[in-house]
């Protein structure tokens, strides 16, 4: 079927008749000067008959222009569409411990933040149709990227994040509370927070326990990821020795946050493990919204617009014919 997106534009169509009606008395008064002369009257009637064509063309131009302004469009048959997407807020730790180089990417030793950026790049690129947001936290937490479908922007803002940008400590509670604040006004959303950290809560104005209560109240699921190797070899005064670079990681707290909100806790000791975690997250929490009907639309405004343009060209040619004829007679 055909319908108009802006049907109210039809209200301007009578303006042309109003302008014509206002101009008619002046033309009639001017024409009355020729009434005493019968031959002139016959010529006037002939001229009036010839003038009908430009008038009809002007009416056609105006009508088709108004139709184009009303934006006609063709609507196809309704098609059922099932909405499925995810909405995820990603919170990344920028505390000083994230600079520990206990990770490997492509055979090269890198710090934890570089590894997180590397793996998140692939994770973000696969989120076609999903809404993603980015929170960075250290001494405090702030929204680096609000919820958006623009994955390239989220990735770019993550790549630009640097350590010690907002301090050296870890405000896990603030990061969760800020995520909850961003989610609380959304409806029909699965409200997922992916929390990446390598330590324990040492800063911020909101404790993890308070943030947990907020997350439970607003039904925000937390998928916590503890980043860091269990063991690395370092050179010391008495030679090489093995140390645990993740001794400050509060796994009990992260596990409790995840389980209490219906999420899950993961441990990422290497790049490969983090990649596997993200693959698992691909299976979680699709939004199963109610089935909607989508009607294909095709714009048709160019047809009346093209007709109006063609009629306008013809009208201009008819207006120019007497002038051209007059110039030809003058040359003779």
Image (cartoon, rainbow, N blue to C red):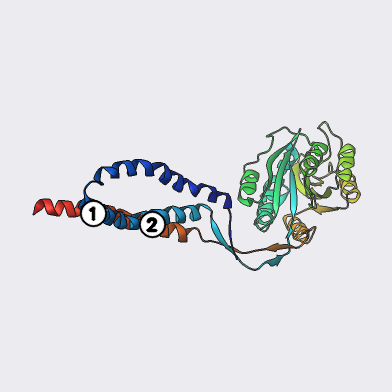
Q: Pointer 1 and pointer 2: residues touching (CB < 8 Å)?
A: no
Q: Which mark is residue 141?
A: none
Sequence-first tag of 1 and 2: 1
Kindly indicate the quadrant of the structure image that contains residue 208: top right
- Relative to the observer, which residue lies in front, 98 or 48? 48
In the image, residue 161 lies at what x, y percent?
65, 41
| Disc 1 crowd, CA 10 A, few/some/many (<14, 14-19, 20+) | few
Left/right placement of residue 61 relative to residue 322 reads right
Q: Nearer the viewer, mark 1 or mark 2?
A: 1
**What residue do we see at 54% from left, 48% from top?**
11
- Relative to the observer, which residue lies in front, 11 or 78? 11
Q: Secondary structure at mark 2?
A: helix
Q: Which mark is residue 43?
A: 1
Q: Is residue 248 visible?
A: yes
Q: Secondary structure at mark 1?
A: helix
Q: Which residue is mark 2?
A: 56
Quadrant (top left, top right, bottom left, bottom right) of the C terminus: bottom left
Q: Is residue 6 visible?
A: no
Left/right placement of residue 184 relative to residue 210 reads left
Number of numbered callouts drawn: 2
| Disc 2 crowd, CA 10 A, few/some/many (<14, 14-19, 20+) | few
In this view, 198 is above or below 77:
above
């Amino acid at each position: 079927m055909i319908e108009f997106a802006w049907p109210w534009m039809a209200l301007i169509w009578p303006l042309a008749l109003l302008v014509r009606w206002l101009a008619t008395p002046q033309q009639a008064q001017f024409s009355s000067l020729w009434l005493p002369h019968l031959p002139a009257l016959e010529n006037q009637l002939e001229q009036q008959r010839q003038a009908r064509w430009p008038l009809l063309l002007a009416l056609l131009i105006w009508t088709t222009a108004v139709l184009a302004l009303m934006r006609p469009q063709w609507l196809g048959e309704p098609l059922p569409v099932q909405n499925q997407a995810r909405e995820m807020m990603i919170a990344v730790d920028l505390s000083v411990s994230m600079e520990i180089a206990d990770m490997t990417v492509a055979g090269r030793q890198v710090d934890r933040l570089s590894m997180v950026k590397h793996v998140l790049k692939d994770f973000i690129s696969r989120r076609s149709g999903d809404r993603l947001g980015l929170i960075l936290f250290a001494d405090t937490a702030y929204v680096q990227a609000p919820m958006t479908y623009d994955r390239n922007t989220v990735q770019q803002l993550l790549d630009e994040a640097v350590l010690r940008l907002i301090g050296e400590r870890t405000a896990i509670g603030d990061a969760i509370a800020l995520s909850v604040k961003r989610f609380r006004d959304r409806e029909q959303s699965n409200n997922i927070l992916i929390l990446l950290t390598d330590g324990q809560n040492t800063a911020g104005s909101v404790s993890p326990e308070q943030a947990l209560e907020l997350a439970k109240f607003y039904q925000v699921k937390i998928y916590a990821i503890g980043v860091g190797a269990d063991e690395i070899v370092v050179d010391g005064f008495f030679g090489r020795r093995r140390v645990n670079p993740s001794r400050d990681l509060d796994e009990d707290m992260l596990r409790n946050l995840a389980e209490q909100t219906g999420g899950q806790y993961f441990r990422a000791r290497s790049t490969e493990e983090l990649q596997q975690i993200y693959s698992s997250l691909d299976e979680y929490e699709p939004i199963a919204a109610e089935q909607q009907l989508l009607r294909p639309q095709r714009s048709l405004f160019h047809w009346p617009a093209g007709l109006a343009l063609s009629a306008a060209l013809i009208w201009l040619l008819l207006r120019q014919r007497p002038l051209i004829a007059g110039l030809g007679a003058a040359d003779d």
